[in-house]
Image (cartoon, helix red, strand yellow):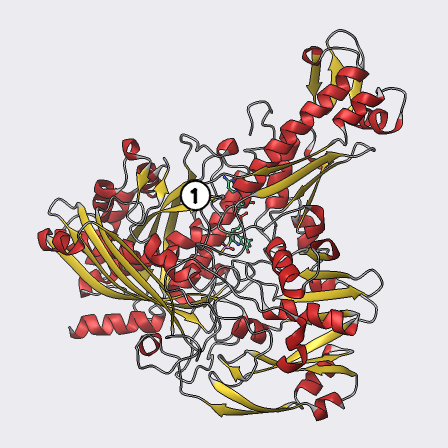
Amino acid sequence: MSEAAKSKYVGSRVKRREDPRLLTGRGKYVDDIKVAGLFHIAFRRSDYSHAEITSIDTEAAKASPGVVGVFTADDIWDEFNPILAQSRMRNYQPTTMAILAKDKVRFVGEAVVAVVAESRYLAEDAAALVEIEYNELPLVTDPEESVKEDSPKLHEQLASNIIVQREFNRGDIDQAIFESAVHVKERFRFHRKTSLAMENRTYMAQYDGGTEELTLHTSSQVPGIVRDILVDALDIPGSHLRVVAPDVGGGFGGKTSLYPEEVLVCILAKKLEGAVKWTSDRIEDLISTSQGFDELIDAEIAVANDGTILGVRADVIGDVGAYSIYPWTAGIEPVQVISFMTGPYKVEHYHGRVRGVATSKPPTGPYRGVGRPVSTFVMERLVDMAAQKLGMDPSEIRRRNLVQHDEFPYKTASGIMWDKSGFMEGLEGACEAIDYDALRSFQAEAREQGRMVGIGIASFAELTGIGSRLSASPGMPINTGTETATINLDSTGGITARFGVTSYGQGLETSLAQVVADELCVDIEKVRIIQGDSAQVSHSTGSYASRGAVMGAGAAMLAGQELLQKLKRVASILLACEIDQLSYEDGVFSALTSDNKYSLRDLAKAYYSQMGIIPAPLRNDIGDLSVTRVYDPEWGTTSSSTHIAMVEIDSETLKVDIKKYVVAEDCGQMLNPMIVDGQVHGGVAQGIGAALFEEMIYDEQGQNLTASLVDYVVPSSTEIPRMDVVHLDLEKPKTLGGVRGMGEGGTIGAPAAIANAVSDALSPLGQQVTTLPVTPERVFRLIEAGRQG
Ligand code: MCN
Ligand code: SMO
């Protein structure tokens, strides 16, 4: 909220304006768009994880009813420029994105042949008739094997399977360990996940041969990024390529990358001079959308007698799958694990190393939290294990190590700058809200009765709203540092605000309307928000990395303030008074010197249509009643939070029941507290999934054993507890409006809090959770080990 504007909406629990539309089936998703003469794609995908393609026979498919074309890599090879995610990371080895597999397949589910037909049914029937012969190659499915020098290579042109490497070094970790009173060393594993948006990926491209315009409708979180790369890939000017993300049914990171199918619909629409669509079915989605996490972490912590953390070491192997995703690269997930490993704590000595290794699985990419759910899991487990050895309460060891008030800005061992945020207040706030001491007494009593009750704390910090001084991945091919907002008053008095940041469930359509309405002092119903259309803004990227609120609100404030200045100039002419003699309230200008009034509608009419009223030179000077502004928060800002969970493990079923859950968080100025609550609830729900249920399982052949929602288990409402969310009202950051991002935080804290709670419940048995998800089977094994050991 800029100082000039009154905050009528910002900070209020405004109901989401998109919900009536989305909840009553009136949303318009890509798959809902009706186009005459639309062609449909069905894919033949690879059944093998690593194989040469020795022959493809498409004759029978071509002859099948309704088929308009059957395409292999060779058929489209000349239609696009190679797509390569670049990075400045040392030792990074780029891999070219295959649109259709050429000569070789590298994971089960990789698209090999595209069949285009008059209906999806006919396309599927024909795709079944395609004959592909493969020559199987050595397996590259185990990351620990794949990392070895003598392992078979997935990409023959590369030096090794290690396609990403990075290291951070501060101080002397060996010395810190040597000097420590307590040293904990453990191997952790966080298994692979999928983003699992409700709406599967879906793309529809239309080519108009007359105007040479290409329009892509895509279920993307980042239509601006998609537009920019397609311009390069297809050699088509941006003016002739429109990329639209209409309603999008969730993304959670899985829709932040460019996908082969997205490029392919464009190539085929051009080739066939028509409209071509592909909508993923659930199986395709589970085997081909970028997946999350999947790291193996050897980690150590060195702690002094008084609980001070002396040093941390982490050696990470990330199983990044077969290719680098565009534009983030395969570094996006595993590199963040070591970048954020030391969390919100003061750690003087740190050594972090990561190797992202290629395996025959779908690429990993951003998934809500990106790296930080994993780093937080590891760090928070280490802290708890050290506390246990010291006989110190988990809350106390955190209290002693969190960056304190007067220590901000604090530079972490990996070079991240934490600006002032409520690290301590989060811990204290969560402890207070859950009545921590009472909970510990309750636990002690329950333990006496032989019940497995555990309490887990997780504190973390994240960087949100990052601007031009930081990129999600160093040296990425696409600039993702700024965002644009255009606000205009049209000749009927209509107010339209256009944004590059996109909405796909997280509520920006409402929260940005709140900001615009406040800046222009108008009723929120009067503000129309347009997002997700590359033709509406010159540059956009989209919403990811919890930046939508910071970027969008910042750009809206700048544009809104400037537009108001323009409107004041017009009003002062219309009301024949000086600007400082104007009063402006609820969309109506009045002169302090007379009874005259001008509503925005009358003002717009007068300005645009009643030519005699405004002198021409002034009109030429003021121009359109429209302002476009770009916001760049440069380094972004820190958000922080503490989660506390209490769980009880059922001794019969081994179900982990979450009895209590509290989140205390600092996201600066909330645009909409109801949306923030919802984001925390949803984020924690996904974190609970990651902690207890969700795992993408591949066998050693690289076959996905969880390619349906029967096998890939997500939590339902009955597994998600009631939660208390405490919003800390503290000093605001320097971002415009004092906003910090928060859309991912729930997912960052929950796996760690639950892993700590389950470990605490099992501590009488001397067991620690080191693998997530800690499914009932893993709980069983831990209990068995405890009973035997
Ligand atoms: N918000 C607010 N006040 C703040 C911060 C945020 O009111 N101080 C509101 C925002 O206005 C927005 C929401 O909370 O409506 C999230 O804002 P922000 O943290 O800026 O995150 P983004 O808008 O960039 O959204 C992306 C983020 C990410 S990275 C993932 S992944 C994710 C998430 O949000 N995917 C989601 N939340 C999701 N929620 C839904 N329903 N669906 C997804 O796919
Ligand atoms: S994983 Mo979120 O889209 O940055």
Camera-side residue: 90 or 787?
A: 90
Task: Return the residue found at the far top.
Answer: 593
Residue sitting at x 63%, y 27%:
561
Residue 387, horizontal then vertical, whole percent: 18, 51
The residue beneath circle 1 is: 725
Secondary element at image label 1? strand
Total marks in image: 1
Quadrant including the N terminus: top right
User: Ligand 1 closer than 8 Å to the CB at disc 1?
Assistant: no
Camera-side residue: 229 or 536?
A: 229
Quadrant including the C terminus: bottom left
Residue 196, horizontal then vertical, whole percent: 53, 65
Indicate whether 373 appears above or below 602. below
Does the rendering let one see residue 533? no
Camera-side residue: 390 or 243?
A: 243
Indicate whether 135 appears above or below 275. below
Would you say 209 lies left or right of 732 here? right
Residue sitting at x 49%, y 53%:
682
Residue 537, horizontal then vertical, whole percent: 68, 46
Does the rendering let one see residue 255? yes
Splitting the image into 4 quarters, where does residue 149 fall? bottom left
Q: Amino acid at mark 1?
A: Val
Would you say 770 lies left or right of 367 here? left
Splitting the image into 4 quarters, where does residue 317 fall? bottom left
Splitting the image into 4 quarters, where does residue 585 fall? top right
Q: Would you call the spot at circle 1 few (<14 residues within 10 Å), some (14-19), or many (20 or more)? A: many
Would you say 301 lies left or right of 671 here? left
Residue 555, horizontal then vertical, whole percent: 59, 37
